[in-house]
Image: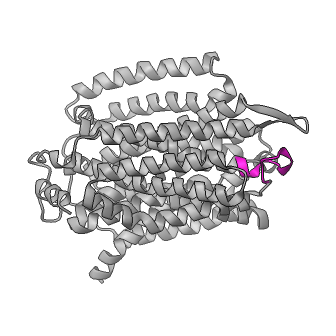
């Protein structure tokens, strides 16, 4: 029985990661109909997406740090439990206020991936860690690609509450499997949890992401948005000072400032931007009316199916990305992945009228995302002590989230400024979509440059003493083994 649990730990954790991505995307097909179904305004309905973004961004580094200190399995189960509770609340209500609160609970699932990656590092032998981490990183794209068409089919042919009942059942299954198959890691970070730091980071991130996500609606020069940006700067400046003076900070800023940690965080932000443009712009482009001359007029179900090959490709290529990292180092894998993303956008610029070319371009972007996302956590694992892996990977996931939020705002700004009137309504032009592809591709190239700037893998410093055991291996010996994997 113990051997079976050990063999199933990786697929169980991957299932949790896929669930997290599915929970983030299932509400998308509902957005056009939610005002009618709930009696709320379109602005209020948009908070079902914004609430998940904000809570996920805030809770990911916080729960990562809590996992390092109090047990990664314990915090993982808590995150899955909050996600499932939120899904159950959505299934039982049509009240927009309760829906927004429930979606905020589901945002806790964003911590599942960094916690799982940290568990894999602690529990697996070095020769298996690379492929397992690559698979775990790919679950973000796999779940998003699966969740959109699945949710669209349920919404189209059944009551919308059925979708949340289905995700509740999946959440209970994921929680039960994780409780049964995942062992508690013995690696712990000592000290007291930094409550002040957690509250300060939460306040700063809420100001930042609320301003970015609502800037297009409220107006980028409106007092509310400018006030949020100003508040973000002030709060994060005070938080930075507090973190440097605290004995057990939420985020070790001195460690995070080292090039081997800082540059992967920068690359994560840029890659998140580049990755999100693929699905965001593709979905809008193929759903544009065919009478525009460039749109295909596809339904949301067909749109999800267009993105499905990319998700399946991510699943199939995750072992390949792990082999490249083992042979050449994750820095090269990251650079290769971001370069492939840029190549995918080049294909989109060359031809975004034919459906098969749209699918090919989107799939190429997904291939690049697979390589990039699998390399990022490996870079972090090699650069931080064993006792800080969950919190450090939580910050890396946070940077991806910020990149996605900025991409959403940037794409919206580009498309708003490149519109034409179609049947009395403004519709983005093909030039606007192509400009968005150029923007995302350029960001991908900047991410490639950041990846190549990361110090070489052989420059790995020894892990400080006192990081604790990792399944019978010291942090230093484990990382040396990872280097030679």
Q: Is residue 171 visible?
A: no
19 relative to 72 in the view: left or right: right
* Residue 433, quarter of picture: top right
Quarter of the image where one finds residue 137: bottom left
Residue at coordinates 27% horizontally, 36% vertically from top-left? 256
Compared across the picture, whether 86 is left or right of 420 comes to: left
Query: Is 423 one of the magenta-colored residues?
Result: no
Q: How many numbered callouts?
A: 0
Extreme residue in the right direction: 423
Q: Residue at x 81, y 33 (%)?
A: 420
Q: Is residue 14 something one can see in this rendering?
A: yes
Residue 479, horizontal then vertical, whole percent: 17, 55
239 over 316 or under it: above or below: above
Q: Furthest-front residue in view?
A: 350
Task: Give the extent of the magenta segment.
Answer: 285-296
Closer to the camera in the image, 422 or 475 = 422
- Horizontal side of 372 relative to 101 (left or right) equals left
Q: Nearer the viewer, residue 136 or 244?
A: 136
Q: Quadrant of residue 35?
A: top right
Give how far across and how far down residue 114 sits, in percent: 37, 52
Nearest the eye: 239 or 393? 393
Seen at 11% across and 45% down, the residue is: 464
Left or right position of 107 against 152: left
For this orientation, the residue located farthest to the left is 465
Determine whether 440 is above or below 414 in the image. Answer: below
Indicate the position of residue 223 as horizontal and vertical percent values: 62, 15
Residue 291 covered by magenta stretch: yes
């Amino acid at each position: 029985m113990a051997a079976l649990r050990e063999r199933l730990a990786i697929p169980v954790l991957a299932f949790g990661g896929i669930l997290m991505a599915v929970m983030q995307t299932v509400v998308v097909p509902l957005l056009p109909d939610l005002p009618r179904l709930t009696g709320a305004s379109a602005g209020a309905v948009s908070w079902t997406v914004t609430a998940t973004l904000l809570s996920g961004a805030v809770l990911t580094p916080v729960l990562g740090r809590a996992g390092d200190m109090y047990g990664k399995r314990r915090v993982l189960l808590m995150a899955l439990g909050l996600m499932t509770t939120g899904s159950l609340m959505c299934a039982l209500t049509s009240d927009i206020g309760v829906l927004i609160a429930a979606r905020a609970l589901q945002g806790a699932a964003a911590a599942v991936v960094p916690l799982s990656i940290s568990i894999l590092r602690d529990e697996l032998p070095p020769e298996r860690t690379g492929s397992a981490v690559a698979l775990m990183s790919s679950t973000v794209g796999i779940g998003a690609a699966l969740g959109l068409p699945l949710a669209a089919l349920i919404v189209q042919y059944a009551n919308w509450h059925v979708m949340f009942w289905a995700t509740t059942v999946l959440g209970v299954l994921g929680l039960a499997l994780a409780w049964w198959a995942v062992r508690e890691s013995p690696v712990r970070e000592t000290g007291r949890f930094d409550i002040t730091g957690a509250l300060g980071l939460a306040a700063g991130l809420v100001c930042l992401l609320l301003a970015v996500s609502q800037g297009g609606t409220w107006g980028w020069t409106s007092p509310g948005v400018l006030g949020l940006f100003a508040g973000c700067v002030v709060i994060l400046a005070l938080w930075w000072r507090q973190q440097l003076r605290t004995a057990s900070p939420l985020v070790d800023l001195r460690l995070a400032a080292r090039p081997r940690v800082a540059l992967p965080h920068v690359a994560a932000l840029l890659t998140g931007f580049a990755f999100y443009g693929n699905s965001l712009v593709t979905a809008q482009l193929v759903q544009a009316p065919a009478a525009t001359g460039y749109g295909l007029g596809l339904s949301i179900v067909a749109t999800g199916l267009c993105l499905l090959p990319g998700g399946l490709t991510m699943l199939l290529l995750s072992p390949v990305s792990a082999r490249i990292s083992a042979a050449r180092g994750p820095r090269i894998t990251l650079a290769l992945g971001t370069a492939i993303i840029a190549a995918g956008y080049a294909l989109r610029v060359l031809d975004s009228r034919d459906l098969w070319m749209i699918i090919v371009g989107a799939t190429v972007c997904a291939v690049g995302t697979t390589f990039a996302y699998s390399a990022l956590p490996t870079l972090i694992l090699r650069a931080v002590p064993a006792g800080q892996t969950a919190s450090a990977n939580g910050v890396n996931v946070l940077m991806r989230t910020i990149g996605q939020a900025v991409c959403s705002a940037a794409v919206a700004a580009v498309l708003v400024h490149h519109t034409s009137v179609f049947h009395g309504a403004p519709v983005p032009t093909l030039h606007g979509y192509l400009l968005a592809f150029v923007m995302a591709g350029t960001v991908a190239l900047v991410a490639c440059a950041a990846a190549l700037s990361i110090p070489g893998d052989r420059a790995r410093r020894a892990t400080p003493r006192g990081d604790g055991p990792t399944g019978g291996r010291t942090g230093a010996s484990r990382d040396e083994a990872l280097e030679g994997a």
